[in-house]
Image (cartoon, grey):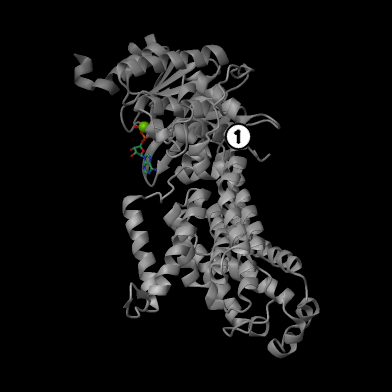
Amino acid sequence: MPRIGMQAIKGTITLALPLIALAICAELFFPAAFARLATLYLIYVTAVVGMQIYSGNSGIISFGHAGFMALGAYGSSLLTIQPAIISTSLPNLPGWLAAIAGGQPLFVGMAGALLVVAIVAALFGLPLARLGGAAASIATLGFLVIVHVTLVASTDITRGSQTFFGVPRGVSAFPALIVAVTAVALARTYRGTRGGLSLRAAREDEIAALACGVNVVRQRFVAWVLSGLVSASAGVLLAHFLGAFSPKDFYFNLTFLLMSMLILGGISTVSGAVGGTALIVIMVDLLRRLEGGAEVFGLQLPEVFGLTDIGVGLVILAVMYRLRDGLFGLREVDERLFPEPVVRANAPRQTPVSDDALISIEGVGRRFSGLVALEDVSFIVRPGVVTGLIGPNGAGKSTLINAISGVVPPSSGRVLLNGTDTALVPVNAVPTLGLGRTFQNIRLFRNLTVLENVTVAADAVARPGEDSRAAAMAALAMVGMQDDASRPANSLPYGAQRRLEIARALALRPSFLLLDEPAAGMNPAETDALIGVLRQIRADHQIGLLVVEHDLKLIMRLCDHIVVLNKGQMIAEGTPDEIRANPAVIEAYIGKRRAAA
Ligand code: ADP
Ligand code: MG
């Protein structure tokens, strides 16, 4: 269920108020030229907010959204074009299209265009959603080119590269305002939903998001289609604002303009999209006047070709140089001005892990192109027991953790988690089967808050109607971090970052927790606190722990059972006392000769 929180409502109102004021001034007080500029601004806001839904949440820069605008513009224009013009301007219109084209009211044009865009976005989104980072960006560029070429080639329908004209002009500031505010509300709401939050988490760290049960591919798909629809509505508005246009109006120049708007304000926030668009619209308007050779204080300036594009480019460069996250940064304006109070949790998780829960590691082996990282490892991890996994560097401990959690499937053998082979389910499904984990190199969602980090995991296992934020607070309480809930994760000291990673794993309500060197880099006080937390987790909830650690003293204090790996082989298993006395372990740790002495 989407979480339509107070924060999204506050955010929408905060951003909508200036837009409403602008539209009222445009309709009632501004001279025509200013009113046109205000309307254009509202149209661009819709387009850029659309881009923000995909790019801002997924972190993937999109070149494709001008393509959505083009589809919206042509789709709606075909449906609404003045019927009298069709026979002269589009004489070869295919019969099926001629039957529905022309004379429809604007809202039918909009609905029809959005239907087409939804289908196109979904078809392209299926493969696109599997891509991340630069590969996805390039694919969106491909989308733009495909749309453009198709429009130019479909001469019978679009008049090709010639101007498409006769589109009814009904868009002034108020209609544009309605669509823009709807776009802002959608984007601001989406950001806080389970889907939006989990996509932002994947933007920060895809592997960690998978370990929190996030279906990254599905969330990218949803964001792409939603953002395409919003940007396409801007295309519809633009078509009915201009009345005439051609495919090149929706190509690289527009793409560059929209990207500048988004990046200048800051891609991560809806506030950034709205604010950045305002700045660029004003700047472009001023530069256009200068470009045409304006008169400033009685001085006639020469015409400067390309001044607008150069100016926008330079401003982007300057802002990126000083502020990587754009003028508005990583948090919404409303999140800074009216933050939602954090409600402390007092009810921790209810049911302890059942006694029949079990991780059964059965003859697990793993090769990396010739290198044997693990060979025939078998042991069992039980609920309520702390199992230590020790061994020298390169012994295969992290590889085993990855094999259990499904990130690096075993080359031989298998891992059964409560009877399910973890290699046979999607990586993001393993966490929800009851397995939480942390990483040797901390993997937090660095630019999200502490509470958001944990909520991503809580969302993945939330029961219908359950408040995941409350569940997340309960998980934070288990590691003593409730007071840090609203801090950004990257502002935490090192030891707290490690504990946050544990809280995030606990929010999955796991039966088992795999911790890869949880005390690495901690000072003695932090290590003591960690041991206390881990003991408490076992005592209160019967969670089974598998702890990889270099620090033998910590392992001996904490563990009930210890497994020793050396060069991928399991060389010993037993209680701390048995392990301490085992000659093979002593040899692996301190070498043959010293052991003999
Ligand atoms: P540990 O955590 O016990 O220090 P690892 O499990 O990280 O050891 O590594 C075991 C061995 O496997 C090492 O020799 C390491 O270089 C190798 N290894 C681990 N992951 C990969 C990988 N993705 N590709 C190639 N070799 C790997
Ligand atoms: Mg390791």
Q: Which residue is drawn at 42% across and 46% down?
A: 329
Residue sitting farthest toward the top: 577
Q: Which residue is drawn at 38% across and 9% down?
A: 577
Quarter of the picture containing the N terminus is: top right
Q: Residue at x 65, y 39 (%)?
A: 4
Q: What x and y, as percent, mark residue 262?
A: 47, 57
Rendered position, 116 above or below 299: above
Q: Looking at the image, which is closer to me, 153 or 544?
A: 153
Q: Looking at the image, which is closer to me, 518 or 160?
A: 160
Question: Cβ of disc 1 within 8 Å of ligand 2?
Answer: no
Q: Identify residue type, mark 1.
A: Asp
Rendered position, 562 above or below 233: above
Q: In which quarter of the image is residue 400?
A: top left
- Helix, strand or loop for disc 1: helix
Rendered position, 438 above or below 564: below
Q: Is residue 343 left or right of residue 108?
A: left
Residue position for label 1: 459
Q: Looking at the image, which is closer to me, 366 or 458?
A: 458
Which quarter of the frame holds ligand 1? top left
Q: Is residue 597 left or right of residue 126?
A: left
Q: What x and y, as percent, mark residue 47?
A: 56, 61
Q: Quadrant of residue 85?
A: bottom right
Q: What x and y, as percent, mark residue 164?
A: 63, 81
The reply to whether residue 396 is in sight is no
Rate crowding at label 1 as few (under 14), some (14 to 19) or many (20 or more) other CA atoms within 10 Å.
many
